[in-house]
């Protein structure tokens, strides 16, 4: 019973010393580059911003003295900021439920097996994966008062010529933005809800069917509780995207007419890159971050409670 | 070939003290089975031997060399996992060859060993398939094949049969036993199934709450358990434990039950039990120590007992019947046709020579 | 509409569901159709009142113009920036994810911090990043954009790959460790083949995110390294738009995405829901 343990790699030979260290420190070695980049590009600018937000720096004046909460106090006096927040809220509050509802109805349509379902689903999710800038540009073409098809279609149904300046007329800019937004992101909701609905316990549904439960009773008692976590996640992801909405509006209205459709992201951009208010922009950025953090925390808390 | 020696091994998971000071020596070529209820630390102990877990205290030696600081791959062991751990993207052949390739074995040698192993396990026809195309039993054979080709000095099995259905399990058990006879490598096998433990082991190591409760040859543990736990764990159906009190009688010692009944204990054991007179005990009688009284005179230590058959569970070869002893339910294992109907009055012979007496306070067996 | 495949109802409304599915698909795909169609129209057809529903003929002069004017450089830039940053993010992110998943490095808190990085709105960091980039002369260059997109996508990659790696049975790795592989080999020979589909899917999404990004590109590009979304916005005019270029550029910038995503359809749900829904 002699030991043959001194086989090949079993010897902790000197030549293996480096390899050994590499392996012993492996958990930290392989995590380091990613964390470094995140700190550098993610955290460092935030800290920089935080410092600057307590100073009074503009692009032209490099005044590094600290002014306390002046920039933050300014936030409360800035009417245009609160309007921008209001615009963001309007878009979010209207678009999110619409996307959820349309996505749910779409999922209902496709929940049962049907020939070619895969193809339909593949086609329907296309809007979601294209660039929001392209989506905005596409609807810009669609809405054009002279050469776009939307007016033409509406005229057909109205029986008389309908001429709407969608992206300029104050009554129609919000509908235009929301149509584009809902067109692009309802399929996102659809896809997640379709997956969630397919995972609803079949035997529960069959039992309810045998009990003679009505459609809405089944919906309330079985389906909604089962898909609630997915709805929460989907709404969280989309909600956060909507609060920071930028691309679609840039492509469709550029915040206009005037500043009528200026959202918080657009306003921040304007402050930073047109007004060059470095410090004030930083303060707004932290307002946005605080806002998103509150929303995220509340949603996650509620999800935890529901669990 | 190597022996395995553990001394003072402790392992914690956070606050959980999973292994609490295990000293164990497994001889070269021995088939040792670590057995115990779930959570007893048997898998942890095996993984510690493999090097997949580091002990928080104590040493592990394989073949005389302490291996605490060696990585799993440096310990020259082979391991078979519960879920087979086959690589789904590799063919059976490549799965078996995986460990050899990792050790840069020459291609010719790999081919030779793979076909040897495949032959030994009867999976020669499956070499080009992928794991998902195999049945559970076949996958298990591949997993074992992967271990065999390594010609490691120590084989570890982590509940390898628990995912198989009953019939396959019996079959594979036999195969593993045969395998050990053929390759005679030291094997350590973890299971929670006492039948596997009894049938496979040269030596059973019974663990409880991170400690070795008792170890020894299977029949030694079965017949001479040192604690009530060991007595209760081994044997199916389990041993009957009847609360009683030891009382002195005219010609020896009896067990007096709470309902007033008594059973006379064998005179041969009187001396050993004298000290325990007056104390409460648990009287342990294995189901197979009951038999239908034939009317012939009874041997010393065997007493007759009249009972009413309650539940009757025939298995074909033997029939289990529930009876009452000392006011509690007990199971007696009889011949297939010894008892036919519920409520039947039966005359039993109970062999108390092999009865186990347990101190309920300490759990220790009274000898 | 039903929740379950209950046979009686199923047959009764199947036809109705097909009608609904086709109408729905037509509505949702019409804008995409319109975009493609304009890209094939001649100027006369584009600026026709009332609008023409089909082009007279399929002709590629709009695309030809993009090549002739050199506008397609933006597509090439996007390919480079999105491609390189995805590869880097995938490599670094997957390694990091392995450490998080298997060694629990940094505990639950580090994992949470990383995913919270994903929630930070780009607008909140783009301005300080711009100032830092100006300071280091990294504006309007490949390196800056690639670094930014790598950082931007890392949390996503780490989060997704952590999920895929956790799904790999631990026993496979342990078995390989016993069989004689070291950790690096385990990652390469066992984990990598097991997570390859998830890795491919995550790469595709990473690419798509970088490809579709507008805000960072808008701020950090000037003339040298313009990406395609920024190039697209150059065609917008106050009164009139360069319709032919908008359409053709949009199509060019969308095709790769369509192809990539349809290949990865099985992983779409898990990919876009940040792993919360496994589809």
Image (tube, coloured by chain):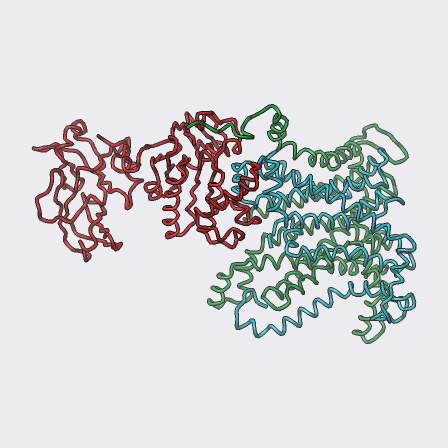
Chain colours: A green, B red, C cyan
Residue A115 location, quadrant: bottom right
Q: Residue at x 92, y 68 (%)?
A: C44
How far from the left and from the top, in percent, is residue A112? Answer: 58, 66
Q: Which residue is drawn at 53% across and 64% down?
A: A217
| Residue placed most toward the observer, C185 or B9 | C185
Compared with C59, B228 (above or below) is: above
Compared with B233, A250 (above or below) is: below
| Residue placed most toward the observer, B58 or C225 | B58
- Locate the C terminus of chain B and report the quarter of the image it occupies: top left
Q: Is residue B44 left or right of residue A107?
A: left
| Residue placed most toward the observer, A211 or B33 | B33
Q: In this view, does B292 lie to the left or right of B231?
A: left
Residue B40 location, quadrant: top left
How far from the left and from the top, in percent, is residue B36? Answer: 37, 38
Q: Is residue B213 left or right of residue A158?
A: left
How far from the left and from the top, in percent, is residue B288? Answer: 22, 45
Compared with B122, C179 (above or below) is: above
In the displayed orientation, state which residue is furthest to the top.
Answer: A14
Residue C53 location, quadrant: bottom right
């Amino acid at each position: 019973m002699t030991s043959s343990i001194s086989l090949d790699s079993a010897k902790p030979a000197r030549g293996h010393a480096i390899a050994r260290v590499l392996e012993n420190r492996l958990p930290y070695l392989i995590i380091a580059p990613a964390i470094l980049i995140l700190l550098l590009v993610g955290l460092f600018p935030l800290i920089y911003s935080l410092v600057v937000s307590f100073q009074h720096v503009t692009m032209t004046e490099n005044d590094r003295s600290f002014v306390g909460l002046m920039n933050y106090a300014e936030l409360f006096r800035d009417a245009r900021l609160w309007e921008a927040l209001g615009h963001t809220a309007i878009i979010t509050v209207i678009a999110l439920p619409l996307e959820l509802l349309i996505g749910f109805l779409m999922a209902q349509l496709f929940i049962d097996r049907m020939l070619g379902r895969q193809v339909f689903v593949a086609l329907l999710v296309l809007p979601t994966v294209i660039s929001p800038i392209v989506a905005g540009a596409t609807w810009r073409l669609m809405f054009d008062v002279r050469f776009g098809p939307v007016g033409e279609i509406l005229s057909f149904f109205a029986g008389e010529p309908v001429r709407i300046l969608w992206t300029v007329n104050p009554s129609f800019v919000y509908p235009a933005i929301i149509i584009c937004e809902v067109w692009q992101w309802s399929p996102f909701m659809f896809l997640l809800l379709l997956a969630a609905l397919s995972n609803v316990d079949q035997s529960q549904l069959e039992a309810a069917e045998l009990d003679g439960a009505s459609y809405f009773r089944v919906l309330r008692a079985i389906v909604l509780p089962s898909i609630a976590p997915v709805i929460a996640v989907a709404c969280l992801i989309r909600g956060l995207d909507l609060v920071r909405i930028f691309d679609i509006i840039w492509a469709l209205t550029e915040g206009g007419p005037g500043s009528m459709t200026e959202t918080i992201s657009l306003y921040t951009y304007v402050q930073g890159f047109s007004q060059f208010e470095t410090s004030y922009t930083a303060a707004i950025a932290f307002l946005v971050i605080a806002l998103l953090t509150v929303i995220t925390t509340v949603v996650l808390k509620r999800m935890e409670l529901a669990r | 070939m190597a022996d395995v020696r553990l001394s003072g091994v402790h392992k914690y998971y956070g606050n959980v003290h999973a292994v609490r000071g295990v000293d164990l020596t497994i001889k070269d070529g021995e088939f040792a089975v670590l057995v115990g209820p779930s959570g007893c630390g048997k898998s942890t102990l095996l993984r510690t031997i493999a090097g997949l877990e580091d002990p928080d205290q104590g040493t592990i030696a394989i073949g005389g060399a302490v291996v605490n600081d060696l990585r799993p791959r440096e310990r020259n062991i082979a391991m078979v996992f519960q879920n087979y751990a086959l690589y789904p993207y590799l063919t059976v052949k490549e799965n078996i060859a995986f460990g050899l390739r990792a050790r840069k074995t020459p291609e010719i040698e790999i081919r030779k060993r793979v076909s040897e192993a495949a032959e030994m396990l009867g999976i020669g026809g499956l070499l080009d398939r992928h794991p998902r195309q195999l049945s559970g039993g076949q996958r298990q054979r591949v997993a074992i094949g992967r271990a065999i080709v390594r010609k490691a000095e120590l084989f570890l099995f982590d509940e390898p049969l628990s995912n198989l259905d009953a019939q396959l399990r019996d079959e594979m058990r036999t195969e593993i036993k045969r395998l050990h006879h053929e390759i005679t490598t030291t094997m350590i096998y973890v299971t929670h199934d006492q039948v596997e433990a009894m049938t496979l082991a040269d030596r059973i190591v019974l663990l409880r709450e991170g400690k070795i409760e008792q170890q020894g040859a299977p029949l030694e543990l079965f017949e001479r358990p040192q604690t009530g736990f060991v007595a209760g764990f081994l044997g199916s159906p389990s041993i009957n434990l009847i609360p009683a009190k030891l009382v002195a009688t005219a010609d020896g010692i009896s067990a007096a039950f709470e309902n007033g009944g008594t059973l006379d204990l064998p005179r041969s054991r009187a001396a050993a039990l004298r000290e325990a007179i007056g104390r409460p005990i648990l009287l342990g009688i294995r189901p197979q120590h009951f038999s239908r009284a034939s009317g012939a005179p009874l041997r010393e230590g065997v007493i007759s007992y009249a009972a009413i058959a309650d539940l009757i569970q025939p298995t074909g070869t033997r029939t289990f019947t529930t009876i009452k002893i000392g006011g509690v339910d007990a199971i007696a294992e009889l011949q297939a046709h010894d008892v036919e109907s519920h409520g039947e009055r039966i005359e039993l012979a109970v062999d108390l020579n092999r009865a186990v007496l347990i101190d309920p306070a300490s759990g220790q067996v009274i000898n | 509409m039903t929740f379950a495949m209950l046979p009686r109802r199923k047959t009764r409304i199947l036809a109705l569901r097909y009608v609904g599915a086709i109408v729905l698909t037509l509505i949702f795909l019409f804008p995409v159709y319109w975009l493609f169609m304009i890209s094939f129209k001649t100027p006369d057809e584009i600026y026709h009142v009332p609008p023409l529903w089909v082009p007279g003929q399929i002709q590629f002069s709009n695309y030809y113009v993009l090549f002739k004017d050199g506008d397609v450089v933006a597509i090439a830039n996007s390919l480079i920036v999105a491609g390189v940053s995805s590869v880097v993010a995938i490599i670094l992110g997957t390694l990091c994810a392995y450490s998080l998943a298997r060694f629990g490095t940094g505990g639950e808190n580090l994992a949470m911090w990383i995913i919270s990085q994903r929630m930070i709105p780009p607008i909140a960091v783009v301005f300080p990043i711009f100032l830092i980039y100006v300071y280091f002369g990294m504006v309007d260059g490949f390196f800056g954009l690639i670094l930014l997109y790598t950082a931007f996508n890392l949390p996503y990659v780490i989060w997704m790959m952590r999920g895929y790696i956790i799904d790999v049975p631990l026993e496979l790795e342990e078995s390989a460790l016993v069989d004689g592989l070291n950790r690096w080999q385990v990652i390469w020979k066992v984990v990598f083949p097991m997570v390859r589909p998830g890795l491919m899917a995550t790469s595709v999404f990473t690419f798509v995110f970088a490809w579709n990004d507008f805000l960072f590109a808008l701020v950090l590009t000037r003339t040298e390294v313009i990406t395609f979304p920024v190039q697209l916005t150059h065609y917008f005019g106050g009164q009139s738009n360069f319709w032919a270029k908008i359409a053709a550029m949009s199509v060019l910038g969308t095709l790769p995405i369509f192809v990539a995503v349809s290949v990865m359809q099985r992983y779409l749900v898990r990919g876009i829901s940040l792993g919360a829904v496994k589809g």
